[in-house]
Amino acid sequence: MCRLALKSADEPFSPYEMLMAMEAMQEGYDGSGLGLLLRGIEFDDFKLKPNHVILSGIAHTENALQRMADFMGESGYELKYQHEFDMRPGIIETRNRKRFKYVVRVYKTPDWSNLTQDEQELRLTETRLALRKNGEDHGGDLTIFSLWFDVIMIKEVGWPLQIGDGLGLDDDRIKARVVMAQGRQNTNYGINLYACHPFFIQGISTMTNGENTAFIPIKEYLLGRHIPGYLGYHSDSEVFTHILHYTTKVLKLPLEAYKHVITPLKTEELDHHPQGDFLKGLRTACRRLIIDGPNAIIGTLPDETCMLVMDQKKLRPATVGGRPGAWAIASEMCGVDALVPDRDPALDFQPMREHTVIIPPERKELKIWSQFDPFTIPQAA
Amino acid sequence: MVSVRSIYNTPSSLTYHDLPWIITHREDRCTLCGQCTAVCPVGAIYLTYRRQRVPKLDVLKKQRGNEYRHFVGIRQQTDVSKRCIGCGMCSMVCPNEAIGPHPNTNENRSAFVRSQKGDAFKRGGRRNAPGKTILDRISFDRISMLTDPALDAGRHEFNYNTILGRILPPEEYLKRKASGEWIPPTREIFPFIIGSMSFGALSPNMWLGLLQGVAYCNEVLGIPVVMATGEGGCPPWILKSPFLKYIILQIASGYFGWDEIIRAIPEMQCDPAAIEIKYGQGAKPGDGGLLMWFKVSKLIARLRGVPEGVDLPSPPVHQTLYSIEESVMKMIQTMSMAFGFRVPVYPKISGSTSAKAVLNNLVRNPYAGGLLIDGIDGGTGAAYDVSMEATGHPIASNLRECYLDLVAQGRQNEIPLFAAGGIGKNGNVTQNGLAMIMLGASGVHIGKYIMQSAAGCLGNEMGRCNVCNVGICPKGITSQNEKLFRRLDPDDVAQRVVDTFMMIRTETKKIMAPLGRSQSLPIGMSDALGIDDADAAERLKINYIC
Ligand code: SF4
Ligand code: SF4
């Protein structure tokens, strides 16, 4: 079973902290892969501006790196900064795996002053997808994880702490206010890196443990939406990210609605729900997005909101704990201990099937919302 | 050699071993009670006295002579109209196990002389194609072994219901909900539906039993089973009762019974589950309904608004309309309007290579509440043998194609597809149904299976019985003759309906649990299906396993 950890703190921290926490949970995974998402970035030697975006990925050859740079330049993005990982040789096997360069580059966007926020986001997605396709058209020599305002993604095969050491993540040159990390199980070197959690689309990211048995029908339905970025699906968990995107960005429903989409209440329960009529209709309309299988889904939104939901039967563990200013979510309790030791563990919370745990961007307190409670629906209910 | 003329012989003459079923009678066991001849629905057997000559030679007296033994026996009629249908009622009533039919494994010469009196052979039942169906051969092979704990069919909660009715895309739903516009009606129902069998085709006791069973499933067990009427209306007391919500009313090209239905609308306590517009039937594509005169009793005549004792054929098409597109549109709209746009309306068509065209037409019709496709293995109360045997399209690939067409358009959640025709043909009803669902059906209709399971219908795919058309149903299922249908106790039928649906519910869970599915019916979960036939796997786009 994969191990998951997320930390959200007012004070930016090093992703290496997360890797240490993963060590605490090491019993449960075989250390065969790591996925990291960093949000709310602070570079030690560069200051991000609002019109800056960060591109993360791996160029597997020099040629791919060059094509990537050319493409960005031709698309009107101006290179502002490039993070050089302080690579420690011999820790990550880079040659056989063809890791020519781990890319984290900051670009100034073209002049988008006449574009709406949605249009700008669409441009970013289109650029990311074009780069990804460019890599795929060249035998997979370019892997692109994210292109977003303040998000860095790192994915690699191996033991998490080793990857951190190999990339020199302990040098405190990159810090973030939100970090998501997943230690994978059953990953092999031949794996498509796109299959590693967390998954990313337009600033939204989720990671999951467990198996999604309703994968094929959900995938077929998402593909049928014809929304840019709804592709890939190398992992059955990628659909969770896209459903979150679909719910919040396309349907423009609040985060709470996610739970009602993926694990709706039963008819008998909705009969007594204050928004039962609306929710029954939503359940029917989004029927193909109902997930199945044991899962804990941990996610973050562009505004640094973090969340955790469980599958309908709560067949997976997950705990949230912390204090004002610093919160952690982990698949194992010891993970929370390692991430926020100076908290009152008595206040730790393990969500049940009906809960959505939300860590708001202000990080003052947790919001634990039950599916049985009403929520604000902009115009509809 | 004697002259041919001295032997009674015509082109249609048959001997008993030319018939499809041969009666074996054991004289040593027969008590001459006569029950078998009394019960035989076709008069295939008769009691007769025979004399046997026993030659005698007394050597000592040097005398030759004969003695005669007399005996009483059961003989089989060789007249094709009275041929044994293999129903087995004679064995059922025989106190001494002295009699019973056996299928003729040599040849069935009666097939050549069934054309009598200028008419082609008509019957009830189903296509005579025995053996495993494609659905029987599918197994559920994506067992969820990666994660534990696995689901427990006995302990966990399962959501296995389905939706009937037009479903809006989520964006459209939110928009309409916000502005208070009309949202198409939907029903949450059990995915195994009792398929349309008309009140004229079925006996009153059968109908009552089915309805009682359905009501019990809904009201006591919480299994939301619905049943469809078939053409020919619905008894007024049901139309005005709260049970109407469990009933799908069918309108077909004869419009039989709809005067009564429309007149009852103001007095209805609730809406029907749905309206099914029949354009075609899997067992006899291109044919309208047919209720033969034997079955048009006083009651049926009243329900349908016709004189007693006349053949009631429905035309093959809805005559008043120009094309199927126009017809479907007008009929769906008219029916929707009649019930205040509160009832899902959907067409039923025969399985056909052109089903996709009909489907695409429905996708564009915002009032269409689904599509039911009925495959070649569907049953019927009466049809020409040639229609049943050779006309139509098997359901599996037909439905799969339609589903994948919807998937390609991203509309698979909007128009629920229902499949019928041979589901449970060999008794594996849940397995067949779930296979169809994973191929993309939202649910399945079962007709013959429910007759066999709930009422003991004797028909099979080897031509057994299948005399549903002429009102002599030996079990009283498809007869309007009181003497016959009194054999069927509605309470017993209701009990069997309940047993059947409880079994289907349990088996559904037993199939879903190992696949790791419990939250929703696994519609279109084709990755879970495997078949040991590479061509079928390729056609259905499922795994080839061996
Ligand atoms: S099997 Fe049926 S039809 Fe044949 S003799 Fe017996 S009762 Fe008559
Ligand atoms: S038992 Fe009745 S319903 Fe069944 S095949 Fe015979 S006549 Fe038809």
Image: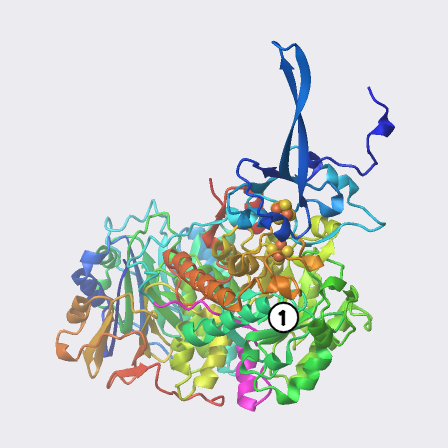
Asked where in the image residue B235 lies, by quadrant, the reply is bottom right
**Residue B327 falls left or right of residue A234:** right
Instruction: Place residue A328 in its image quadrant.
Output: bottom left
Q: Amino acid at mark 1?
A: Thr
Q: Magenta residues?
A: B157-183
Q: Position of residue B474 (x, y in %)?
A: 61, 56
SS for callout 1? loop
Residue A273 magenta-highlighted: no
Residue A343 is at least partly visible in this image: no
Front-most of A236 and B465?
B465
Can you identify the residue that label 1 sits on?
A: B229
Q: Quadrant of residue B395?
A: bottom right
User: Dot 1: few (<14), some (14–19), or many (≥20) neighbours within 10 Å?
Assistant: many
Give above or below for B532 relative to B181.
above
Q: Assess whether residue B174 is covered by the magenta stretch.
A: yes
Is B128 placed above or below B262 here? Answer: above
* Relative image position of residue A197 (x, y in whole percent): 35, 62
- In front of the other: A357 or B126: B126
Answer left or right for B164 relative to B367: left
Ligand 2 shown in quarter: bottom right
Q: Is residue B218 visible?
A: yes
Q: Residue furthest front?
A: B61
Q: Chain of mark 1?
A: B
Horizontal and vertical percent position of residue A9: 24, 78
Quadrant of image for the N terminus of chain A: bottom left
- A121 with respect to A169 (left or right): right
Where residue B5 sits: x, y (%)? Answer: 87, 29
Q: Is residue B512 left or right of residue B486?
A: left
Nearer to me, A52 or B178: B178
